[in-house]
Image: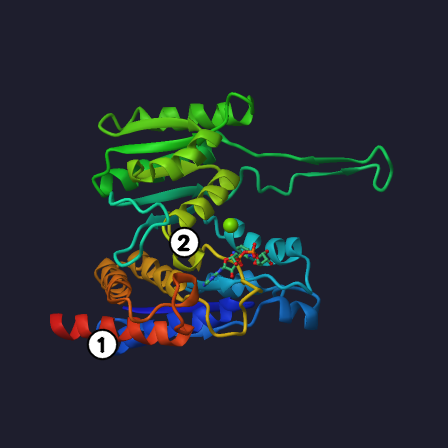
Amino acid sequence: MTKRIAVLPGDGVGIEVVDEAVKLLNLLNELDPELKFEFDHFDWSSEYYLKHGKMMPDNALDVLKEYDAILFGAIGDKRVPDDVTVWELIMPIRKNFNQYINLRPVKLLKGVASPLARDAPIDFVIVRENAEGEYSNSGGRLYPSTEEEIAIQNTVITRKGTGKAAKFAFDYAAKYGKKSVTSATKSNAIIHSMKLWDDAVNEVAAQYPSIELDSYYIDALAAYFVSRPHDFEVVVASNLFGDILSDLGSAVVGGLGLSPSANLNPDGEFPSMFEPVHGSAPDIAGQGIANPIAQIWSAALMLNHLGREDLGEVVVAAIEDVLTKGEVRTPDLGGQSTTSEMGSAIREAVQKQLVKEG
Ligand code: NAI
Ligand code: MG
């Protein structure tokens, strides 16, 4: 299978960790005769913005549309306002390509001690509604720069959009033999939009009688992520709630350096995009010490999406193998290894496993 991949490293550590993910995919290319990736790199980033006054060229979406998937690092640079980088690059891709699901695994990998130091396995996914919700550009400011200034930011919850996210969550639960789906809500206080969220989720849940639906208010759920994270299997949440929960989930399993994500267009009409949960990490960018695991695992999610779950599993097993041995660890995991040492160790483990399976 030949798959064309658009690579957007972005800014900061994005550039450093994407490099390791691409090296790993190239290795798989060599080892697996049926797999053929063709990569095209795009330098759309804050650097590009400083030169051209925009984050991407005007025809960027037309260009990206032709690819099978997008591998994305992270963006963010203190010379460009964060709302510009987000709304001129990430949001147009997610929204125009109808990547209405953001799938974010939260799994305590073998070889990583949870800060919560409990033996029970932590292994769930967050299904974040990715196209509407609180991240809408509907709204505006009235009476600018006066004492009466008002900002209105509308939340857009639709029965259809919520229903599609809930359906994805329940289908995922059914596919992987999970018993429950947890919905993050706040319909006690946010009585219009979150009540529609509840209605739409309940409607979908009724079609899956063998899977239990638990609804929790987001504040309580945040506490449960810490006090009993092993109880969750599939968590479905609105755009903002899902964003916050996934940073929290990632802290529970060892940090942002380990957390992958997939922006999915489940209907397959547009390319999906694979990126770590983390940002451009300006505090450590340029030092070669970012943990590439979140990015490499995101590439494994891309392999799953492209129909090679077997290879996705090999990559995650290789990551766990390196973590369990414990010799190679980046500073966020308490070690002194570099980004490229971690990347090489994972490639070696992948090679060993594939040659063994051979
Ligand atoms: P961040 O995720 O970049 O960093 C948060 C903390 O996690 C920092 O201490 C950082 O050093 C650490 N960290 C992140 N990735 C790591 C890795 N691979 N290995 C080891 N440590 C890692 O979030 P922050 O600081 O809030 O935002 C920085 C910039 O990134 C901002 O400009 C923000 O807008 C942007 N951002 C972009 C995202 C994207 O491109 N999807 C997502 C989140 C933030
Ligand atoms: Mg985030």
Q: Residue at x 44, y 25 (%)?
A: 198
Image height check: is 265 above or below 201?
below
The quadrant of the picture occupied by the N terminus is: bottom left
Q: Which residue is tagged 1?
A: 31
Residue 203 vs residue 116, the one in the foreground: 116
Q: Position of residue 206 (x, y in %)?
A: 31, 24
Which mark is on residue 229?
A: none
Q: Amino acid at mark 2?
A: Ser
Residue 268 vs residue 13, the one in the foreground: 13
Cα separation, mark 1 vs mark 2, equals 25 Å
Q: Residue at x 45, y 36 (%)?
A: 222
- Picture colour scheme: rainbow
Q: Secondary structure at mark 2?
A: strand
- Residue 103 falls left or right of residue 56: left
Asked if one can make out residue 100 in the rendered structure from this viewpoint, the answer is no
* Residue 35 in which image quadrant: bottom left
Comparing marks 1 and 2, which lies closer to the viewer?
2
The quadrant of the picture occupied by the C terminus is: bottom left
Q: Which residue is tagged 2?
A: 261
Residue 354 vs residue 96, the one in the foreground: 354
Label 1 packing within 10 angstroms: few (<14), some (14-19), many (20+): some
- Residue 76 falls left or right of residue 150: left
Q: Position of residue 41 (x, y in %)?
A: 48, 74
- Label 1 CB-ligand 1 distance < 8 A: no
Q: Secondary structure at mark 1?
A: helix
Q: Amino acid at mark 1?
A: Leu
Residue lying farthest bottom?
30
* Residue 349 in which image quadrant: bottom left
Asked if one can make out residue 289 in the rendered structure from this viewpoint, the answer is yes
Q: Nearer the N terminus, badge 1 or badge 2?
A: 1
